[in-house]
Image (cartoon, rainbow, N blue to C red):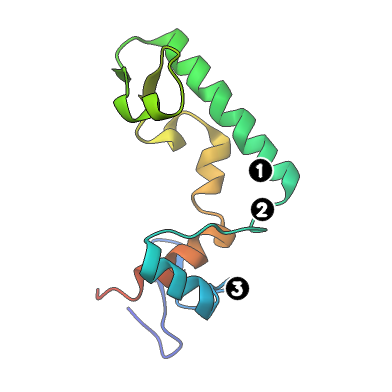
Amino acid sequence: MFTENRTRTTEGIMITDEKQYRLTKEEKAFYEENGYILAKGVFTREEADFFCREAHDLTRRLAEASDTWSRIEGWGSAAKVTSKPRELLHCHNVQFHSAAFSRLIVDPRFTDRAADIIGRTSS
């Protein structure tokens, strides 16, 4: 149930329209024109380095633990960059494999800006 300040509580989860972080008008315009945003400065250098290491570590852990995750050998468009053997690996739902990514996908520095792109939804 919504109250006057557009906040609702659902089984202890607070959902609010208030945001601490927003995209600038220029970032929104860039997204509209290009379909992506390079959000510089959202995370510290140390955090970015940590997420990069965690992504590489997660890839290694998943590759060692299972041969059933998605693997595409060849990856034709990468031939423009290198002639070395290559493969594209991906994993759905990384938040189930990494606590770091679980925290990242709910961090308001990320979610507030993503909400600016998605816009209001009806409920």
Compare marks 1 and 2 and give the one earlier in the sequence: 2
State if disc 2 and disc 3 touch (CB < 8 Å).
no
**Residue 48 position by quadrant:** top right
- Distance between the Cα atoms at labels 3 and 2? 14 Å
| Residue 37 x/y as whole percent | 48, 60
State if disc 2 and disc 1 touch (CB < 8 Å).
yes
| Residue 19 x/y as whole percent | 54, 74
Q: Residue furthest bottom?
A: 4
Q: Is residue 47 left or right of residue 52?
A: right
Of circles 3 and 2, the one toward us is 2
Element type at mark 1: helix
Compare marks 3 and 1 and give the one earlier in the sequence: 3
Q: Is residue 53 visible?
A: yes
Q: Which residue is mark 3?
A: 20
| Residue 100 x/y as whole percent | 58, 37
Compare marks 3 and 2 and give the one earlier in the sequence: 3
Callout 2 crowding tier (Cα within 10 Å): few <14, some 14–19, many ≥20: few
Q: Is residue 34 left or right of residue 22?
A: left
Task: Name the kind of residue labelled 1 in the image.
Answer: Ala
Q: Is residue 10 visible?
A: no
Q: Which residue is mark 1?
A: 48
Q: Which residue is mark 2?
A: 43
Task: Pick the residue in front: 98 or 3.
Answer: 98
| Residue 76 x/y as whole percent | 30, 25
Task: Name the kind of residue labelled 3 in the image.
Answer: Gln
**Residue 31 position by quadrant:** bottom left
Residue drawn 29% across and 73% down? 121
Q: How many marks?
A: 3
